[in-house]
Image: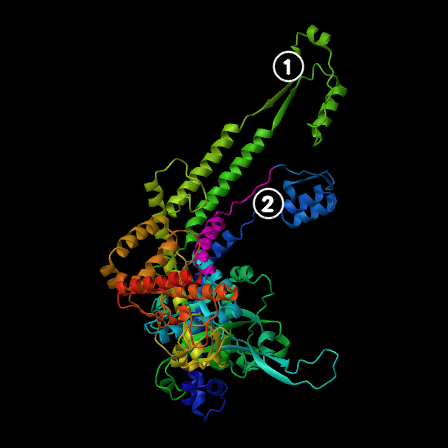
């Protein structure tokens, strides 16, 4: 972590980056520094964009399978026509736009449409990929959806002050999670891990801060008085972006996972295509009028035009064209591909007339040593973020307080540049599923086919035409048809009257059933290869199972869930580290967060914070629900960024039952209980509640100031007896007071105490015998007083 204050002390600021990349004076050393860095940036961008486009097909295939059509594309126009909302001509035009008009329309000899056939069965595609991935994403998302706070920080220290700082940090990050929608964002990141095998999340900036203005006087709407305008921070924190893997490039000399520990690639980034207008009209960018372009990136667009047309179909991607110079420079066209040769020349620079033209905009993250690389006087290593337009024109730059990105992958081989994902494993079976179902539908259509064998020797010419016209109608099976023939004529001709009309229909029931059995078998193969159980998919077991088999099945499923969760937990740990370091480096607002009712005022003040005293605070030595206020510097601590930060795990009643039996045996041995301690006993009880599956989180913890050791049985018995004596004394005192008010007992003379007052005060007895003697004395005195009153 490098704080903003420290970098500013060593002249490492965004202003310094701007000075370097806007320098035009050839006598200034910054000009040589700019040329050097622009050459290196251009080389990395060209290499990275070309590499990401080459490997884009493997990820594009996943997107195509995920976006497969659930219904036939001709369904909408055919349904509209069947409902009478469009006429035959309009339906035909829409079918022609979908390039499937020949499958449903009939034309006459002149080319005019005569009929539209609405089929009873439509071709459909099965989206097996979305079904299985949704199940796995839901299983992982449920582990974190009920976590409050969403990111929990644990201290390495064991003191209450350390725990307080961790709770305060968790509460502050929880506010940030709500403001920036971390719960929804990281659900999307989980889905990308299953779709593409890995996911990278980048900070959109070193620190995001939004300010709003308000009227401090809170004057009525129609009041014409003065307005006291003030500002306040609406939200501030780290905003993340999750780019598509087809647009990510990085230094392949080291595995991506090492980004989380800041020991990995030296540069990484992702690119996008925007309009030149988006850069030109943004006042936060510099070099807006000197953005250069060359034929290199434009050739990449032409070479992978299908890729750009798929992912950028929502905008009109129109890059500027590079043309040769005229006159004496006509022979130097190859120089147009060189950045230095294009400086100051109009063919290689975006102009105001090209506001709607497309331009590559790249987020480039680079590890540097400011002292060595000329960006300042800081001698350590840190990261910078450069926004690069087109080939190498830097339009913005800033220093980062933490790592540039966080990686998360599921079952990835770090020695491979491209790994397959769960979606890739499902894609072949999705195609086979669609083929089998299409064959089933084809067999069903064939089973609906009927052939009418009509003996035309028996029927007259009019009758034959009548039958033909009746069969042409789409509702021939709805109304009975009268078929008249001459039985005498048939007998004279020696024709069997049962053979006048014969209907032939092929039975395809067996073929259809065979297709459905094939689908079931294919799903079983998929479940075996993906190590999925029927219970995981919410399906009943196909046969009766013993308790041992059910338990083994649950253990196997939990093992797979735990393994899959490793990549997700690693990304969460890296994100927690980035948020913590960014907050300490760039946070501007003082802390003001509530904490649980488990800390005393003294502990809060020892940790360096102030408190807002609540109404239920009874003293400095008792825990209360405080609002903690203080500076961010008080949070500097060596926190644990563990992968297991409180995510919900699967319940197991068998474990709960075993722990209950063990805990019962432990409590029967006072010496063993003393050795274990209260904290471990509480942990066992919490684990019993969690594994029981009741859905109730007990979460027993030692309060501030509470002893770790459990009291022994003798001391506990003495405390219970003393408590009974106190209760008896209070009862007798209240009883005597009530009897005196009723006139049953005489009022006490001044200076004389009541029986209860005369009794010795309740103190902790030295032993169980002393407590018993004190209790007997109190009872005897009470009986004597009652006898005198009677």
Name the residue beneath numbered marker 2. Answer: 72
Q: Residue drawn at (32%, 52%), measured in percent from left and top? A: 660
Residue nearest the viewer, comparing 180 with 679: 679
Residue nearest the viewer, comparing 264 with 46: 264
Above-or-below relation of 744 to 629: above
Q: Position of residue 115 (x, y in %)?
A: 71, 38
10 Å crowding of disc 1: few (<14), some (14-19), many (20+): few
Based on the picture, tell me whether residue 245 belongs to the magenta stretch. Answer: no
Based on the picture, tell me whether residue 140 belongs to the magenta stretch. Answer: yes
Q: Look at the numbered disc 1 and give the secondary structure of its residue.
A: helix
Residue 213 in the figure: left or right of residue 386? right
Q: Look at the numbered disc 2 and give the secondary structure of its residue.
A: loop
Q: Position of residue 16 (x, y in %)?
A: 46, 87
Residue nearest the viewer, comparing 2 with 641: 641
Q: Main secondary structure of the magenta part?
A: helix
Name the residue beneath numbered marker 1. Answer: 499
The outermost residue toward the right is 462
């Amino acid at each position: 972590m490098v704080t903003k204050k420290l970098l500013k002390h060593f002249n490492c600021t965004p202003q310094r980056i701007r000075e370097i990349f806007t320098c035009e004076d050839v006598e200034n050393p910054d000009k040589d520094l700019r040329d050097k860095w622009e050459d290196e940036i251009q080389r990395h961008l060209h290499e990275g964009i070309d590499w990401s486009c080459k490997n884009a097909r493997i990820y594009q295939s996943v997107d195509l399978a995920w976006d497969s059509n659930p219904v036939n594309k001709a369904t909408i126009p055919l349904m509209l026509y069947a409902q009478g909302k469009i006429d035959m001509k309009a339906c035909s035009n829409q079918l022609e736009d979908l390039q499937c008009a020949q499958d449903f329309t009939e034309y006459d000899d002149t080319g005019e449409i005569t009929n539209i056939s609405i089929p009873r069965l439509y071709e459909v595609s099965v989206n097996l990929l979305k079904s299985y991935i949704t199940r796995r994403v839901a299983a992982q998302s449920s582990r974190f959806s009920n976590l409050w706070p969403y990111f929990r920080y644990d201290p390495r220290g064991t003191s209450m002050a350390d725990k307080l700082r961790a709770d305060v940090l968790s509460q502050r990050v929880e506010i940030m999670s709500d403001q920036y929608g971390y719960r929804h964002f990281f659900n999307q990141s989980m889905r990308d891990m299953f779709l593409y095998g890995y996911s990278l999340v980048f900070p959109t900036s070193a620190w995001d801060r939004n300010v709003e203005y308000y009227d401090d006087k809170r004057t009525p709407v129609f009041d014409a008085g003065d307005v006291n305008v003030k500002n306040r921070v609406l939200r501030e924190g780290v905003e993340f972006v999750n780019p598509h893997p087809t647009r990510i490039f990085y230094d392949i000399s080291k595995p991506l996972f090492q980004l989380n520990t800041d020991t990995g690639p030296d540069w990484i980034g992702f690119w996008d295509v925007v309009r030149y207008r988006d850069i030109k009209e943004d006042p936060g960018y510099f070099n807006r009028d000197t953005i250069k372009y060359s034929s290199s990136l434009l050739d990449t667009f032409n070479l992978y035009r299908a890729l750009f047309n798929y992912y950028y179909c929502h905008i009109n991607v129109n890059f500027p064209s590079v043309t040769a110079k005229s006159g004496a420079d006509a022979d130097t066209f190859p120089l147009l591909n060189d950045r230095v040769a294009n400086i100051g020349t109009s063919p290689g620079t975006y102009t105001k007339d090209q506001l709607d033209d497309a331009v590559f905009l790249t987020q480039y993250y680079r590890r540097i040593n400011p002292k060595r690389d000329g960006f300042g006087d800081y001698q350590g290593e840190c990261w910078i973020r450069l926004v690069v337009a087109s080939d190498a024109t830097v339009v913005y730059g800033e220093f980062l307080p933490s790592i540039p990105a966080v990686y998360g992958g599921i079952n990835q081989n770090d020695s491979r540049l491209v790994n397959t994902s769960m979606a890739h494993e499902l894609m072949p079976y999705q195609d086979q599923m669609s083929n089998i179902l299409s064959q089933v539908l084809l067999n069903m259509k064939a089973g609906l086919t009927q052939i009418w064998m009509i003996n035309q020797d028996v029927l007259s010419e009019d009758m034959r035409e009548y039958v033909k016209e009746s069969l042409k109608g789409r509702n021939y099976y709805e109304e009975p048809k009268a078929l008249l023939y001459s039985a005498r004529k048939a007998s004279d001709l020696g024709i069997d009257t049962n053979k006048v009309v014969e209907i032939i229909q092929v039975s395809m029931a067996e073929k259809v059933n065979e297709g459905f059995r094939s689908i079931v078998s294919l799903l079983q193969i998929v479940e075996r290869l993906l190590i999925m159980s029927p219970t995981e998919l919410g399906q009943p077991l196909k046969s009766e199972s013993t308790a041992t088999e059910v338990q083994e099945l649950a253990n196997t499923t939990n093992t797979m869930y735990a393994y899959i969760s490793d990549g997700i937990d690693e990304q969460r740990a890296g994100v927690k580290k980035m948020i913590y370091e960014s907050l300490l480096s760039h946070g501007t607002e003082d802390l003001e967060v509530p904490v649980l009712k488990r800390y005393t005022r003294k502990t809060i003040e020892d940790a360096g914070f102030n408190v807002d005293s609540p109404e239920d605070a009874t003293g400095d030595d008792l825990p209360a629900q405080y609002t903690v206020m203080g500076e961010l510097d008080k949070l500097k601590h060596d926190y644990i960024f563990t992968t297991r930060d409180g995510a919900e795990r699967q319940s197991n009643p068998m474990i709960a039952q075993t722990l209950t039996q063990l805990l019962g045996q432990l409590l029967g041995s006072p010496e063993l209980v003393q050795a274990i301690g209260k904290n471990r006993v509480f942990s066992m009880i919490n684990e019993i509640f969690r594994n029981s599956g009741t859905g109730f989180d007990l979460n027993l913890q030692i309060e501030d100031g509470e002893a770790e050791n459990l009291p022994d049985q003798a001391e506990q018995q003495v405390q219970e007896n003393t408590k009974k004596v106190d209760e008896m004394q209070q009862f007798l005192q209240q009883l005597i007071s009530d009897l005196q008010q009723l006139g049953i007992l005489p009022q006490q003379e001044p200076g004389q105490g009541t029986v209860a007052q005369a009794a010795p005060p309740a103190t902790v007895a030295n032993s169980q015998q002393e407590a018993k003697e004190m209790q007997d004395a109190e009872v005897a005195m009470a009986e004597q007083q009652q006898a005198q009153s009677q």
